[in-house]
Amino acid sequence: MMKATARAKLNLNLHILPQGSDGMFPVHYINCELDICDALWFEKQTGIIEVICDFPGVPNGRENLVYKAAQLLKDYSRTNDGVKVRIEKHIPVRSGLGGGSADAAAALRVLTNLWKVKISKQELLTLARKVGMDVCYSLIGGLALVEGDGSAVTSLPLYLPKACVLILVPFEEKPSTQWSFRQLSNNSVGIDIAKTDGMQKALKEKNQDVFFSSLHNDFEGPLTAHFPIIGQMKADLLHSGAKGTNLCGAGLAMAGFFVTKKEATLAQQVFKEKYKQAILGGMQ
């Protein structure tokens, strides 16, 4: 049996570019990882793929991205091997932190070794993109620029600030990531893409003030119109001492960035009863 961890992703700078003729919105992100992790156990077996997770809201079997990743790799390699995967969830579900994508990326990494699959890095990334938009990033991880359809991932040899992140997860849930994309229009996306340069400058020069002012997510405005709780979480975090906030992915969790862990911990104590979850994490 093999064990793996899958880290949550955090968008520091999330821009969506105008919709193309194919109906897709190209992306332009700067991501890092959080030390909030799922745990996965892999047990090799003959033939079949099984995925088990008893966390509410997480599908078992074919509907899980881990199953999809395993099946794609199995088809690619034509192996007779199978696997039983058990997932222990710690990353908040359907909150914009990429837990399902991170789990799928972990499955691709582990099963490549467990099944002894000979596959190039580029071929593995191609499979990852077939699983989902964020799986390529999760396969590479770390501080990175993500562009296009999510498959263009460039590691950034820059410096994350020493900030503690508090993630607030509301009781409300968005319908789906696809629904979030449908709330966008070409008039509302990509306007602040210059903040990407500001973020990279801040990360290069270790400038916390510019880092906080460069946090951005194109989903935040359109989704706040449907879910006022986004604005409430933002206000609560700033009132509690956060130097910056950012909507997580396509929502609905909100990240607050604190200079000290003490401040973040005090805020966590205040909000753990008000919201569904209030989780501390460090950027990696």
Image: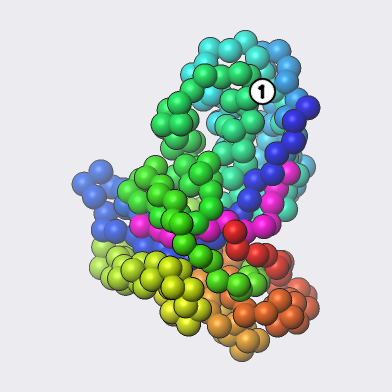
Using the image as rendered, state which of residue 8 and residue 154 is in the foreground: 154
Q: Residues within 10 Å of mark 1 (few under 14, many from 20)?
A: some
| Numbered disc 1: secondary structure | helix
Using the image as rendered, state which of residue 203 and residue 5 is in the foreground: 203
Quarter holding the N terminus?
top right
| Disc 1: which residue | 114
**Which residue: 49% across, 23% down?**
119
Quarter holding the C terminus?
bottom right
For the question of whether residue 155 can be seen, the reply is yes
For the question of whether residue 217 can be seen, the reply is no
Query: Which x, y percent locates residue 242?
Result: 60, 82
Query: In this picture, which residue range is highlighted in magenta?
Result: 28-39
Q: Is residue 18 left or right of residue 184?
A: left
Using the image as rendered, state which of residue 5 and residue 15 is in the foreground: 5
**Which residue: 44% across, 45% down?**
133
Query: Which x, y percent locates residue 263?
Result: 70, 82
Vertical position of residue 144 compared to residue 82: above or below: below
Vertical position of residue 279 compared to residue 71: above or below: below
Q: Is residue 188 left or right of residue 253?
A: left
- Under mark 1, the amino acid is Leu
Q: Residue furthest left?
A: 21
Query: Which x, y percent locates residue 58?
Result: 67, 45
**Which residue: 32% across, 52% down?**
26
**Which residue: 45% across, 35% down?**
125
